[in-house]
Amino acid sequence: MTLSVAEKSYLYDSLASTPSVRPDGRHQHQFRPIEIYTDFLPSSNGSSRIIASDGSECIVSVKAKVVDHSLDSDLLQVEIDIAGERDDSLITESCTSLFNKVLRSIDTKKLQLTKKYSFKLFIDVLVLSSNSYPVSLISFGIYSALNSTALPKLVSNFDDLEVEELPMFHDYDLVPLEVNAPLVFVLAVVKNNIFIDPAANESEVANNGLIVSWSDGKVIAPIRTIALNETNTKGFNPQLIQQGIKLVDQYAEEIAKALTNL
Amino acid sequence: MAKDIEVSTAESQFILEALKQNYRLDGRSFEQFRDVKITFGEELGDVLVELGRTKVHCKISSSITEPYEDRPFEGLFFISTESTPMAGPQFESGNNTGEDEVLISRIIEKAVRRSGALDIEGLCIVAGSKCWAVRASVHFLDCDGGFVDASCIAVMTALLHYRKPDITVHGEKIIVHPVDEREPVALGILHIPVCVTSSFFNPVDAEQNIKGEENSEIVLVDATLKEELLREGVLTVTLNKNREVVQVSKAGGLPMDAMTLMECCHRAYDITERITDQILAAVKEDIAKRDKYSAILSSENAR
Amino acid sequence: MSQFEVYSPEGLRMDGRRWNELRRFETSINTHSHAADGSSYLEQGNNKIITLVKGPTEPALRSQLDQTKATLSISVNVTKFSKFERSKSTGNTKNERRILEMQTALVRTFEKNLMLNLYPRTIIDIEIHVLQQDGGILGSLINGITLACIDAGIAMYDYISGVSIGLYDTTPLLDVNSLEEAAMSCVTLGVVGKSEKLSLLQVEDKIPLDRLENVLAIGIAGAHRIRDLMDTALRAHAEKRVLNASKR
């Protein structure tokens, strides 16, 4: 987004004032409205499409495959494709590695089928368009896609070490997957203020960005900083990290609830 | 393409105007396929095909490898097409992701490999562990249009001409007999696909072509390089002698009436018939030449 | 496909259609108004395709600048989850030969149908995302692009509608799905408007020469039907928009 010097300075001053004034009148903790559709890809086990009010859009598909977990212990795999970016571009690679780390908080015991076999989940993310840093959108997408995921019901024996057999599934019964997917929040720091979900114009003047992950009622690792623009980025008061974590701690529960009750 | 060849405005207008008056630069009629010249090299499966000034070389080689896991009863067959600046400045060496290169290699792939011209099940030696891998390497030596047509002829002639060493199987053990020890064996060829390319020119404006009723487009068979550079659409039909369409590719270009395209296909069949006969005759003649001792060794007598 | 009957003696196909019936064809345009200048979402059977048209805009590279007409670039992104079995390839699918061939075919098809000479020194970028595929994908891509280009307001001569026809023994089957596509030879057509003119024609497997004409005839009729379906959808959309505009 290209802003003039005057626009930038106005935005910066209003965001830096106490209390901060956001250009669209949101509160410090307020998200922009989003639309989510789930379960629209019949050939995937779970899917979601999420659209932010600024037109950013992301599609997530969850596909499951039966694997021998003694051979392949990595039961969750995320691949992110951002339209218009190469597969080896910085943003794609950093998002992919972030989510592969974040999703380690998921208890893979839930994917175990038998003593030998487990489901492996392939989570493919396609970011159709993004105007601001997309990780928050992607995490909401993954959260709702995993919530909509249903896996075939096992009918064969759980203990297959004694009798060698491949897992057998019910012809049409599906069991919903119950995992506590993590959420990732992007916060922007402007002078001494910190706020959730920066829009494109807010990102442009932010002094720094903070990525905070949250799962199952508490803030988890990784927490990291992220430069939201190339010109304005500088250091910030470490107390803001605490403030940011507190902010996420306070409101993430509600957001998770809203996403679950779709 | 590294560097597009450009035809000067004066020359392109001259060629197009001549086409409108039913003349081609090389004096051929619109439906005439250039003469095909097939020359064999020293070794078996080494073929040079000349189509007018276009030269394409194809060499077959084979080795014994492991088959794909999911296809244990099939051998391997690869066609690699390589275009280098030797053929013309429009080709870049080492880069085969250019639009035309991809189309050429895909069409040859579909015409020969996917159509099952080579019996790949016959290449299996021991199911699941050993099979023949046959590789056809196509090199473009000189370009004057009609690469697809010439390469297809080259690949098919080379496959018909090639002989792989004879083998004896003892369980898991294989003995490969050198060529001078035992007569090598021919590959199993199931049918001979021949590609015929037609080029389309539009003598009127774009709107006439799309909205008009008259179908006045000019159709040329086997275009030369200059005609290829000026054409607005292209159709490559691959047929075999059994009246089967193996592959048709008209990847966009000038919209053409369905009936005109059908006519192209029927015209291509006549050319296919002729070229198939020529390929078979050439291969037969060359093999007979190599086989000079057979008359002496034969136990057959004149009676 | 031995456990399935491709075409039953009663004249029914695997999914219950007759030989001359199209799949469900649902489409909407202007679906991504924020992200692109023109967009369409197309469901043809189980094919689900998002098409975004960006442009005409100033090209980023000088090599894409043409003094006489707009440069057309089409990129097809077939997602890894688009098939029933997730694609195993680890690398980039965008550089597969099959995809490159499709892109070239699409560019050459639309180059002749969009009035590119009206937009000199610009680039028109078409981005296609295949969310799900179930046979006859090239035809669906053509339909998606046609709709998105109309939404973008790019001048065109006529609709181009794409459809695939299979030949089962002697019966042509219109608009094949992936099971049928795997079981028989197929022909893909790109037909210009209501004419008999073919912009694109692709046959990938063996078909008897004398049957081809019959297959083309069915295909052209099917493509005309698709053109009408697209036209109805577009007009319905336009009516709604005009109504909304006049309310304001």
Image (cartoon, helix red, strand yellow):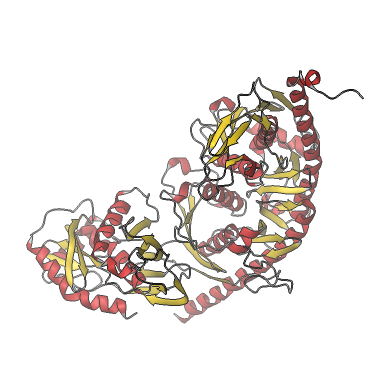
What residue do we see at 19% from left, 73% from top?
A: A29
Residue A244's place in the image compared with B103, above or below, is: below
Residue B183 higher or lower than A239, as above or below: above
A81 sits to left or right of C184? left
Residue A73 picture quarter: bottom left
Q: x and y percent of residue A244 in the render?
A: 14, 67
Residue lying at the far right in this picture: please name it: B303
Task: Tell me residue C245's x, y (percent).
Answer: 48, 76
Of residues B183 and C180, which is closer to you in this image?
B183
Number of numbered discs on residues = 0
Q: Is residue B156 left or right of residue C237?
A: right
Q: Quadrant of residue A258?
A: bottom left
Asked whether residue C83 is in view, the answer is yes
| Residue at 52 percent of width and 65 percent of height | C151
Identify which residue, C44 or C3, lies in the foreground: C3
Which x, y percent locates residue B228?
66, 36
Q: Nearer the viewer, residue A236 or C8?
A: C8
Residue C5 in percent (x, y) is at: 66, 68
Write the residue at 74% across / 44% down: B239
Quadrant where the C terminus of chain B is found in the figure? top right
Q: Nearer the viewer, residue A210 or A41?
A: A41
Task: Locate residue C218 relative to residue C176 in the image: left or right.
Answer: right
Q: Quadrant of residue C222?
A: bottom right
Image: A17 above or below C64 = below
Residue at the image point whose x is 77% and y is 59% from the top:
C214
Q: Is residue C159 something that shows in the picture?
A: no
